[in-house]
């Protein structure tokens, strides 16, 4: 029997023999595409080749890509661990043609690889093709149908609708009709009793899709229309975990050598046995939830580790929050169902890194770092998890006791409780939903979203400025910053307005050109004065107490204004304060560089404050800094200051 590494290698070797260049996986975290947080398909990194924006390195490419499907259009999180064939992270092996070969070759090669190279029994395979769609004006995929007829019995070709047989990356982007290959892994007796064809695309755990061949012909535009692409391309994706399971004749992905090492290690740590089919035979002693917990852990640790290794630390927003949610889901499972109350996940890392050393070496290279990040996250969540669960149970009990008979049907956890669990106990709302589902309840998501919105509105109101309309003195005038070279300049007032800041009246003035630095990058805005002409000739001095940016405008704040604002104005920055602030700003950059040098390149700026008296620098790191580390950073910064680099 081939192991998973051989199976992967065989795929790559096969396509190399068909003239394909083998490329490495792109990172699982997407940094430069605003429509995606994570790589969710092998083709993401090739999007620009399909759209014609970039030239590919070769017209034929193959690879194995780390993918994550837990957010956006393709989202499998709820199923993961509950069933035996969905994953958060999975490997997608793919072959690509960029304007080169098309349906004929793609179909013939996929059949050759599966049946002749891997030796799969033809009787266990079914294929589907796109039946067409009237609303979209798309015809049936006759070409794919004709090609399949050459190799497979016609009654094994299934017509599929837009949902199953028209593949799209997201709401916009490259897309096209696809043909899928499904494997029926049931026993002979079962196959005799029920025709496998009726089970394709019907969520049967043993009749599963293994390979999707997409024929990229269109670009889906923002208005929903399809624009034909200048060239036709092939984009295929075969889930390695599923293929390995089929080839190793297992009934669950978790019984393959991809996951068995991690599961064995988990068994050892928690002192319990994974009983794969606990769902169907409770008499074996393992509970169904225990089995789910083993699978959740084996799955989630891969997603967590590889995303962190690719540069995404867990955090409270965006992609970082997705990782935190996955991690917390795993913690909750081992805590509640494997009765393990200490950090567990990080202990699985060395084995995992070793397993993937030859294909994704980035994990092995950073294994200590990733383990520490995971451990810190586990520790911090474990501190509040128990209290949160108690809180949840109390609320659920209270609701149950208060439920009127007519309300029995809508058993739901109220939005405020869900929000408290989120805000105080760190429960991502999908974790609360999971807890609710387990007792047959729901979470009032509208209520939760309302409370969340109210909190956002409150914090916005706390910093809000109430503004009147601008009064324009000089229209279309430039608003130029001259303050790198000058701290004093002669200028004019372009526009001004009255504002209320937390109830206190003030004025905002925009100058034609200004030496005042507006607050940005953590550096405070300049203070100083504006000297306006006065009848006595002495000039009126206005104190500027802050400078901020509003879009591209540099806005000066004063407490009062004189009656006349026209004429020339001298704008003068408080030089000593500015100078000291600049020193602290430079020091911030030195500190940032020194931190990365001493702690590692994962250190990222999360916020900063720079004023004339001190600087504060917030950064991401997974542990409290040790005294020696701080001393090293300090020494490095001082050394650089003494170099006095111009
Ligand atoms: N893009 C297709 C998929 O993700 C085939 O690679 O299924």
Image: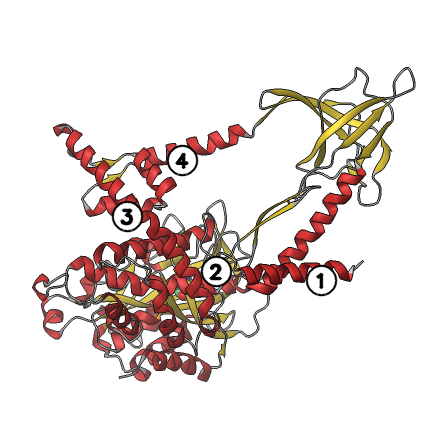
Cβ atoms at labels 2 and 1 below 8 Å apart: no
| Residue 639 numbered tag | 1
Q: Position of residue 8 (x, y in %)?
A: 37, 78
Mark 2 is surrounded, within 10 Å at the Cα level, by few (under 14), some (14 to 19) or many (20 or more) other residues, namely many
* Between marks 4 and 3 in the image, the one whose residue lies nearer the viewer: 3
| Residue 212 numbered tag | none
Mark 2: secondary structure: loop
- Among numbered discs 1 and 4, the one appearing first in the sequence: 4
Mark 3: secondary structure: helix
- Among numbered discs 2 and 1, the one appearing first in the sequence: 2
**On the rendered structure, is 4 left or right of 35?**
left
Q: Which residue is mark 2?
A: 29
Q: Which residue is mark 3?
A: 386
* Between marks 4 and 2 in the image, the one whose residue lies nearer the viewer: 4
Q: Residue furthest left?
A: 283
Mark 1 to mark 4 CA distance (whole Å): 47 Å
**On the rendered structure, is 293 left or right of 349?**
left
Ligand 1 under 8 Å from disc 3 Cβ: no
Mark 2 to mark 3 CA distance (whole Å): 31 Å
Cβ atoms at labels 4 and 3 below 8 Å apart: no
- Among numbered discs 1 and 3, the one appearing first in the sequence: 3
Q: Position of residue 609 (x, y in %)?
A: 63, 44
Mark 1 to mark 3 CA distance (whole Å): 47 Å
Cβ atoms at labels 4 and 2 below 8 Å apart: no
Q: Would residue 7 be visible to someone looking at this image?
A: yes
Mark 4 to mark 3 CA distance (whole Å): 23 Å
Quadrant of the snapshot with the C terminus: bottom right
Q: Position of residue 147 (x, y in %)?
A: 35, 72
| Residue 452 numbered tag | 4
Q: Residue at x 32, y 70 (%)?
A: 241
């Amino acid at each position: 029997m081939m192991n998973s590494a051989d199976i992967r290698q065989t795929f790559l070797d096969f396509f190399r023999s068909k003239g394909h260049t083998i490329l490495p996986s792109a990172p699982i975290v997407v940094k430069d595409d605003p429509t995606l947080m994570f790589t969710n398909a092998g083709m993401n990194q090739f999007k620009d080749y399909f759209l014609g924006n970039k030239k590919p390195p070769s017209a034929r490419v193959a690879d194995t890509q780390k993918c994550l499907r837990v957010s956006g259009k393709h989202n499998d999180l709820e199923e993961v661990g509950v069933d035996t064939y969905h994953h958060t992270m999975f490997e997608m092996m793919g072959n690509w043609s960029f304007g080169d070969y098309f349906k004929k070759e793609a179909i013939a090669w996929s059949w050759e690889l599966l049946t002749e190279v891997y030796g799969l029994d033809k009787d266990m395979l079914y294929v589907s093709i796109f039946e067409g769609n009237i609303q979209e004006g798309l015809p049936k995929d006759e070409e794919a149908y004709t090609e399949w007829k050459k190799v497979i019995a016609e009654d094994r070709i299934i017509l599929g609708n837009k949902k199953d047989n028209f593949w799209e990356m997201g709401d916009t982007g490259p897309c096209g009709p696809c043909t899928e290959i499904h494997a029926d892994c049931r026993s002979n007796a079962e196959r005799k009793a029920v025709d496998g064809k009726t089970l394709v695309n019907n969520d049967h755990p043993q009749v599963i899709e293994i390979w999707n061949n997409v024929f990229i012909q269109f670009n889906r535009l923002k208005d929903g229309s399809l624009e034909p692409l200048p060239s036709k391309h092939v984009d295929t994706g075969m889930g390695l975990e599923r293929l390995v399971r089929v080839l190793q004749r297992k009934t669950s992905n978790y019984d393959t050598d991809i996951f068995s090492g991690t599961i064995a290690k988990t068994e050892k740590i928690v002192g319990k046995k994974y009983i794969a089919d606990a769902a169907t035979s409770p008499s074996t002693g393992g509970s169904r939830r225990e089995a789910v917990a083993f699978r959740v852990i084996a799955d989630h640790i891969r997603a967590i580790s590889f995303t962190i290794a690719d540069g995404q630390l867990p955090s409270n927003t965006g992609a970082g929050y997705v990782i935190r949610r996955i991690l917390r889901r795993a913690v909750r499972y081992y805590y509640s169902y494997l009765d393990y109350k200490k950090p567990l996940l990080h202990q699985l890392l060395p084995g995992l890194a070793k397993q993937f050393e030859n294909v994704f070496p980035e994990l092995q290279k950073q294994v200590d770092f990733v383990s520490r990040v995971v451990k810190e996250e586990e520790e911090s969540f474990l501190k509040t998890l128990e209290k949160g669960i108690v809180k949840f149970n109390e609320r659920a009990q209270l609701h149950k006791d208060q439920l009127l008979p007519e309300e029995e049907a809508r058993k739901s956890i109220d939005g405020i409780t869900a929000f408290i669990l989120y805000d105080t106990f760190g429960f991502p709302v999908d974790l609360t939903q999971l807890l609710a589902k387990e007792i047959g309840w729901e979470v009032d998501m509208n209520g939760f979203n309302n409370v969340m919105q109210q909190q956002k509105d409150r914090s916005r109101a706390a910093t809000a400025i109430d503004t009147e309309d601008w009064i324009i003195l000089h229209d279309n005038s430039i608003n130029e910053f001259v303050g790198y070279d000058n701290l004093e300049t002669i200028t004019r007032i372009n526009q001004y307005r009255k504002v209320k800041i937390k109830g206190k009246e003030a004025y905002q003035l925009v100058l034609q050109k200004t030496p005042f630095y507006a607050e940005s990058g953590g550096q405070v805005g300049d203070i100083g004065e504006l000297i306006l002409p006065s009848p006595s000739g002495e000039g009126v001095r206005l104190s500027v107490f802050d400078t901020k940016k509003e879009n591209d405008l540099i806005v000066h704040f004063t407490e009062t204004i004189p009656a006349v604002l026209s004429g020339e104005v001298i704008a003068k920055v408080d030089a000593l304060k500015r100078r000291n602030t600049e020193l602290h700003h430079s020091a911030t950059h030195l500190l940032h560089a020194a931190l990365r040098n001493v702690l590692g390149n994962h250190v990222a700026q999360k916020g900063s404050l720079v004023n004339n008296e001190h600087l504060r620098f917030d950064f991401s790191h997974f542990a409290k800094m040790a005294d020696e580390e701080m001393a090293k950073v300090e020494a490095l910064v001082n050394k650089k200051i003494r170099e006095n680099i111009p």
